[in-house]
Amino acid sequence: MTQTVAPPRTEPAALPPKQAPRRAWRPTDAFFHVVLAGWAIVSVMPLLWAVVTAFKPNDEVFGAPFALPSEWRVDNFGRAWGGASIGQFFVNTVIVVSGALLLTMLLSTMAAYVLARYEFRGNRFLFYLFASGLMFPVFLAVVPLFFVVRNLGLLHTHLGLILVYTAYALPFSVFFLTAFFRTLPNAVAEAALIDGCSHAGVFFRVMLPMARPGIVSVALFNFLSMWNQYLLPLVLNQNNESTAVLTEGLAMLQAQQGYDADWSALFAGMVISMLPVLVVYLIFQRKIREGFVAGALK
Amino acid sequence: MRHGKYRFIVSFLAVPLGLYVLFVVSPNVQALIYSFTDWSGYSDEINFVGLDNYARLLADETFWIALRNNAVLLVVLPVVTIALGLLFAYLINVGGARRGVVATGLRGSKFYSAVFFFPYLLSVAIIAILWRQAYSPRGGPVPKTMAAVGVDPPTDGLLGSPETALWAVIGVAVWHAVGFYVVLFTAGLAAIPRDVFEAAALDGANRFTVFFRITLPLLWDNVQVAFVYLGIIALDFFAIVNIMTPHPEAISNSTEVVAHYLYTRAFSGDINPQYGYASAIGVALFFLTLTLAAVMFRVTRREQVELG
């Protein structure tokens, strides 16, 4: 970043003595920029290194880590996509994440809506039952979960992962959306009911559109955590290559690499798996940063 | 109408509740039960053995090493990450042009937040793969940089040496998390009324005094949240360890953590699965999490500052 320029003074003649302390701040600003730019480089360099390395011929990957490739090998990406099965992992991830995300959003809005807007016996109990899921580490459940999924015949299947991702996304989503539905006004829903709209009709036609901001925040959060999920597919897929998702598949690929390994394809695979997150971030970056922080403070 | 209402409630709750009970509630309850059994996964025979698994846990040296590593993580990860997060958030927000005596924020502050935040969005699994390559003793950029500045990297690699491995993985976790806390603390700073700073500046307070006497106490809520979140990460830490050092036993367990130890007892394939014992480790982990939450709550609760 460039040296900052003092803002134009509005009343230059009136307050000359104050100018001295103002000038004194500027060198510190420059120092601040050095510190911050330093961390910006630390944040970005490893990622940049991965991208550049993904274009290198295999023998240059570790030979000269800071050099640019002698030739830019785009075919690394083709090899990663096909030969190293990254394409398969990518498709698996898209299927599992989109399925689980749709199901999560449908089920969590339904549950949250009922919990937030209807009085019935056991309402509070059910709300706390869902919310309590936030307190249990997944590791406590993971051994029996493996057997539950196995007994249903859903190991190494997309459906198994979709259902399990959804179940584990429910506590946060229901908790957050219940709070959100409570903040929405009653009048519109009541008017629709009086006009003869069914309960389900009110939900789908009136309340869901009104709840859009909350739904988008929860969906973004869930998308990122599902796309990045590692433990659940590792346990429930057991390194089965044809149903592996990206995180699991790449980790598998790395573990199999020997000395004659196709390193550049591994790097290309990493870049491929980071791309969707980067795209989502570029589109929604403000919303994501604000949403994550707001979610954390809840 | 009434009848319709209850049918509606049931129809909307049945599926989400069913999935949740089947895949989340029941496995948690089962884990508690299995922790009192000798279930090994190889025979169908399951015997209740009372507290044997827990007694074994207390005598298990590797478990204690794992616990100690989690304790190191629990201290180092939050302290370093929060310190860096506060520093960067403070620099971003208090620098820049002055309006009166109050800073308007450093130029490029949005750029910095956006860049710092991005690593946080990447999967821990992917960044663990990336950093394992970056640490590679065969010519990764990290040992090369160390050599260039005159520090000899260990010959077995940073991840292959018991003295450095834990610090190497902590470094990755800090790198991953800092951006989130910069944004969190920035939001907190933005919520502090400007006239508080103005009053302090008029009273002649310098930047350090302002930071420690005003900014930090007013950000205490956010710092508390940060401690809890980073504490949860420190008690998990499975993905980084499993990918960066898949065999902690080869480096004197210097990166072993409780979650990874649990995983290897049940799923590693190198040893006979010990589901009962793994479940007991899971229960221990749950109580650690609960204790952490309770302690954090008590420790950080006092000293809150109310802005009138």
Image (cartoon, coloured by chain):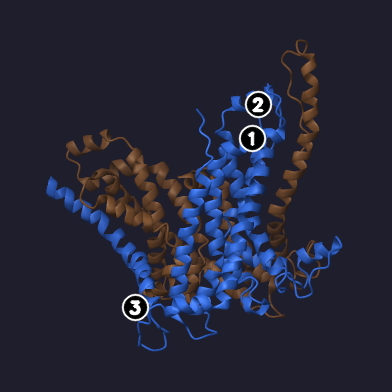
Classify 10 Å Cα crowding around label 3: few (below 14), some (14-19), many (20 and above). few
Q: A76 or A174, which lies in front?
A: A174
- What is the quadrant of residue A64 in the picture? bottom right
> Of helix, strand and loop, which one carries label 2?
helix
- On the image, the x and y values in percent for residue B166 come to 67, 67
- On the image, the x and y values in percent for residue A252 come to 58, 75
Q: Mark 2 and mark 1 in contact (Cβ < 8 Å)?
A: yes
Q: Colour of chain B?
A: blue
Q: Residue type at mark 2? A: Ala
Q: Is residue B231 above or below residue B101?
A: below
Disc marking residue B200: 2
- What is the quadrant of residue A152 in the picture? bottom left
At horizontal 76% and vertical 32% (from top left) the residue drawn is A4
- Tell me the chain of label 3: A
Q: Is residue A252 above or below residue A66?
A: below
Viewed as shown, does residue B143 lie left or right of A282?
right
Residue hosting label 3? A151
Q: Colour of chain A?
A: brown
At horizontal 71% and vertical 74% (from top left) the residue drawn is B160
CA distance separating discs 3 and 2: 65 Å
- Tell me the chain of label 1: B
Disc marking residue B213: 1
> Of helix, strand and loop, which one carries label 3?
helix
